[in-house]
Amino acid sequence: MEAASRRHFLANAVAVPLAARAASAETAAPLSGLLAGKNAVIYGAAGAIGGAVSRTFAREGARVFLAGRTFAHVDALSKEIAEHGGRATPAAVDAMDRAAIDKHLDEIVRVAGSVDISFNLIGLGGEQGKSLTAMTVDGFELAIQNAMRTHFLTATAAARRMEARGNGVILALTAQVARKPYVGSGGFGVACAAIEGLWRQLAIESGPRGVRLVILRSSGSPDTPGVAAAVALHARGAGVSLEEFEARIAEKTMLKRMPKMAEIANAAVLMASDRASAITAAVTNATCGEIAD
């Protein structure tokens, strides 16, 4: 399917399942927790880290709106969350398409009244494992282009709706390579640094209207398939085993380990909650001490 046709299909697919699922989500018992009473939209919700965050947000009382390109995947996750007493509504949304994003957020506001938390966790793509001098410009810039397009579109769309209500939190996840360079990280580290720069810019513009922007910076969660694949690639480039390369990363941290997905999700809960109401334009260091702030 052509990209334009796929995006048109996804944009038109949002309203029907969202409205239908929202009605059943309303019947779930209200939950307590740090995010009780908040509506959270999560892009890339069916991915490994997206799923971990979605489950944790729901467990902490948020009503989660699960956005992904493949409806069947987010639908399965929503059913799993509902089975555990959470409130979740799935929708097919292309997080690279402004019309699809706007349509989805407008529907959330219509059925739930507000968008309180936005968290974009889609994959960025791009090449890793080569030196910059061995890369093509296309391989280098892909992660940067994807990061800037999707994060600009989802963050500014959320900010417009949050500013109108006078509050809201917009989260993003980056990696330690945003600040500490690694050989062979390609355009990924540059993309992470660009996301952090975008967050500072939007924070100063939306802050006066009550919107907070917070980054979570990880050193990579070994229980995430994408991280495991990237680590394996770097291990091959270094001529060592996967286990040895992971041990090298862990040895560089103060806690001598890498953060698990659940730990990143828990940190996200805290930053999205009212307990962190004074924090904005900030990077939450979740690197297990690989970087000292």
Image: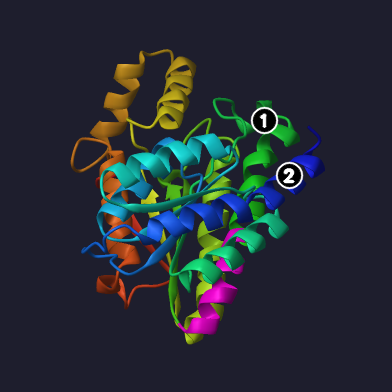
What is the three-letter code of the residue carrying label 1?
Thr
- Residue 202 coordinates in the image, percent (x, y): 55, 72
Residue nearer the viewer, 114 or 43: 114
Q: Residue at x 38, y 61 (%)?
A: 26
Q: Residue at x 74, y 36 (%)?
A: 137
> Which segment is the magenta one?
154-166
- In the rendered image, which residue does mark 2 sit on? 9
Above or below: residue 112 compared with residue 265: below
Q: Secondary structure at mark 1?
A: helix
Tell me the chief SS of the magenta region. helix
Q: Earlier in the sequence, mark 1 or mark 2?
A: 2
Residue nearer the viewer, 80 or 149: 80
Res 19 visible: yes
Give the colour scheme of this rendering.
Answer: rainbow
- In the rendered image, which residue does mark 1 sit on? 133
Q: Residue at x 58, y 35 (%)?
A: 186
Taking the image as shown, residue 80 lies to the left or right of residue 157, namely left
Taking the image as shown, residue 105 lies to the left or right of residue 257, namely right
Q: Name, please, the residue furthest toward the bottom.
A: 208
- Residue 98 coordinates in the image, percent (x, y): 70, 58
- Residue 81 coordinates in the image, percent (x, y): 33, 45
Figure label count: 2
Q: Residue at x 59, y 25 (%)?
A: 130
